[in-house]
Structures are given as structure tokens and as C-alpha cells.
Amino acid sequence: LHMESWRAEVIEEINRINQVLPDSQRRDKTDEIMQWMDSVMDKMDHCKALHCRYVKEAITLLELALWKAKLGEKDENCA
């Protein structure tokens, strides 16, 4: 779910240049492209950071679930 929204955000940012450049003066296009590239990279970095956070949370939940399952196995063996 998050991946789809991040993907849509990045695609929207990538496509934004097609709306900006036609209205730019010739001498301003290089600056516009540089700003756009920075913006795309910032958006991608933001999405990657959020993705890493969600992966870490999922790993923690998985570790807790495995730990709980292991405890359940030990309790069954002791009984």
C-alpha cells in the first residue's frame, strides 16, 4: 500500500518537469532542470527512508512472533 503511494508520488514528481519546462525561458531551463533533479532525488530519498523504517518495524514484529512461537514450543515440550 505504501509502495504504491510512494511510487505515484515519485512518478508525479518526475512528470512535473514536462509542465515546467515549456513555460521556462531558454536561459532558465538549466536551473529548472537542476532544481527538478534535486526535487526528484529528495523525494526518492524520503520514500527510501520511510520504506526502511517500515521494513525495520516488520522485522521487529517478525522477531517477536518467532520468539513467542519458540516460547510456546518450549512450554509444550515441558508439559
Image (cartoon, rainbow, N blue to C red):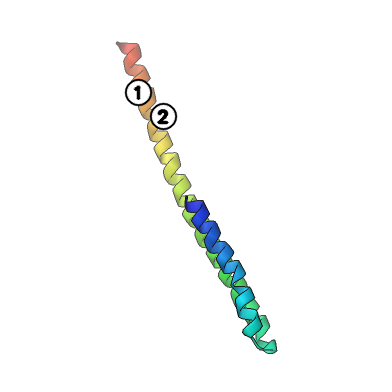
Which residue is identified by label 1? 71
The extreme right residue here reads 26
Tell me residue 65's x, y (percent).
39, 32
Q: Residue at x 45, y 48 (%)?
A: 54
Disc 1 residue type? Leu
Residue in the foreground of this view, choosing between 2 and 44: 2
Disc 2 residue type? Leu
Tell me residue 55's x, y (percent).
47, 46
Numbered circle sitting on residue 45: none
Q: Residue at x 61, y 67 (%)?
A: 14
The extreme left residue here reads 79
Q: CA distance from mark 2 to mark 1?
A: 9 Å
Tell me residue 28's x, y (percent).
65, 86
Tell me residue 53's x, y (percent).
45, 51
Picture layout, residue 70 above or below residue 3: above
| Mark found first going from the N terminus, 2 or 1 | 2
Q: Residue at x 67, y 83 (%)?
A: 29
Which residue is identified by label 2? 66
- Residue 76, picture quadrant: top left
Q: Residue at x 51, y 58 (%)?
A: 6
